[in-house]
Image (spheres, helix red, strand yellow):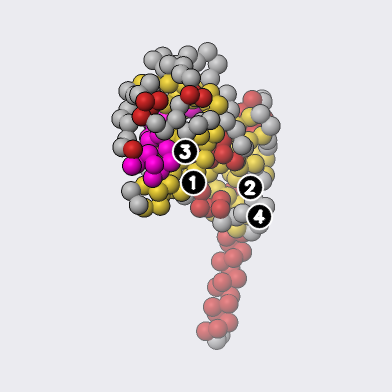
């Protein structure tokens, strides 16, 4: 037997084995909808479910948000964002295990695209962000300020210095900002007469921010503002400086810092 024929035979046998493995894996997951998996009576051994071409509205590192109507659920898995980006425009299934702590979410085990089965597995670095029900949530220590009167002028900014305040309808963006002469991509919150730069958002916050931007929704949350930056900084960045997002609302839930 020639070396070339042997190599071809080995590749063919490996392909058959991998395809068979993918089919066996998929058989252990029940194909269903997000609503049935979370709100219905559909039971699966090990709570394993398969989702066909789920509507992914945002991804960030090991996190993804999937929407089905007014229902939004969190999926988590190692390198989930780059894996899903590589399948852009292709049909695929997500095979995931339903988890119940700290709240219902899904651990992605595999992604099946055609004859390819990609093992994902648990995130090595991230935990599910802390999402709580927005119903009955009453933030403490946040003031209501006249947002339309805020500008980048120092006298206007003094009214919010060292305060936490609510922003119920800010416009969120991810844009290039000139910070100390260096173009930097930052999340920003636009009010009527001023924009603020978001300081060090967590991975969970960035996931929610991406969803809000993609779905063209207003930022509804609470921020804290500390020091007023120099006039030079405010002019160069065309902003009122940095705010820290303390909490944000999305999809009937609250994500806190």
117 to the left or right of 197: right
Up/down of 52 relative to 133, above or below: below
- Give neighbour class at mark 1: few <14, some 14-19, many 20+ (Cα, 10 Å): few
> Which residue is located at x 51 percent, y 53 percent?
82
Residue 89 numbered tag: 4
> Which residue is located at x 55 percent, y 48 percent?
110
Residue placed most toward the observer, 125 or 180 = 180
Position of residue 76 measured from the top left corner of the image (x, y, whole percent): 49, 40
Tag 1 residue: 175
**Labels 1 and 3 touching (C-beta < 8 A):** yes
Q: Report the number of discs.
A: 4
Q: Is residue 234 inside the magenta stretch?
A: yes
Sequence-wise, the earlier of marks 1 and 3 is 1
- Give neighbour class at mark 2: few <14, some 14-19, many 20+ (Cα, 10 Å): some
- Give neighbour class at mark 3: few <14, some 14-19, many 20+ (Cα, 10 Å): many
Q: Is residue 83 visible?
A: yes
Judge depth for marks 4 and 3 and give the one in front.
3
Sequence-wise, the earlier of marks 2 and 1 is 2
Residue 93 numbered tag: 2
Position of residue 131 measured from the top left corner of the image (x, y, whole percent): 48, 27
Up/down of 154 relative to 197, above or below: above
Residue 188 numbered tag: 3
Marks 4 and 3, how far apart at CA? 29 Å
């Amino acid at each position: 037997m020639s070396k070339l024929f042997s190599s071809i035979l080995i590749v063919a046998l490996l392909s058959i084995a991998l395809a068979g493995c993918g089919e066996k894996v998929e058989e252990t997951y029940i194909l269903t909808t997000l609503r049935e998996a979370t709100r219905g009576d559909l039971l699966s051994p090990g709570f394993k479910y398969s989702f066909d071409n789920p509507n992914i509205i945002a991804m960030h590192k090991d996190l993804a948000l999937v929407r089905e109507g007014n229902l939004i659920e969190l999926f988590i898995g190692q390198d989930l964002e780059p894996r899903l980006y590589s399948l852009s425009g292709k049909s695929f299934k997500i095979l995931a295990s339903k988890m119940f702590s700290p709240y219902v979410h899904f651990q992605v085990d595999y992604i099946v695209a055609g004859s390819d089965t990609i093992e994902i597995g648990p995130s090595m670095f991230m935990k599910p962000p802390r999402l709580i029900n927005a119903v009955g949530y009453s933030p403490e220590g946040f003031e209501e300020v006249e947002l339309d009167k805020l500008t980048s002028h120092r006298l206007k900014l003094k009214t919010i210095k060292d305060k936490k305040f609510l922003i119920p309808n800010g416009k969120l963006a991810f844009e290039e900002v000139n910070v100390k002469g260096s173009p930097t991509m930052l999340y920003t919150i636009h009010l009527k007469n001023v924009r603020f730069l978001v300081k060090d958002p967590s991975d969970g916050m960035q996931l929610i921010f991406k969803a809000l931007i993609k779905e063209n929704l207003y930022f509804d949350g609470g921020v804290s503002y500390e020091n007023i930056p120099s006039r030079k900084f405010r002019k160069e960045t065309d902003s009122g400086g940095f705010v820290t997002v303390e909490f944000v609302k999305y999809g009937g839930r609250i994500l806190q810092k």
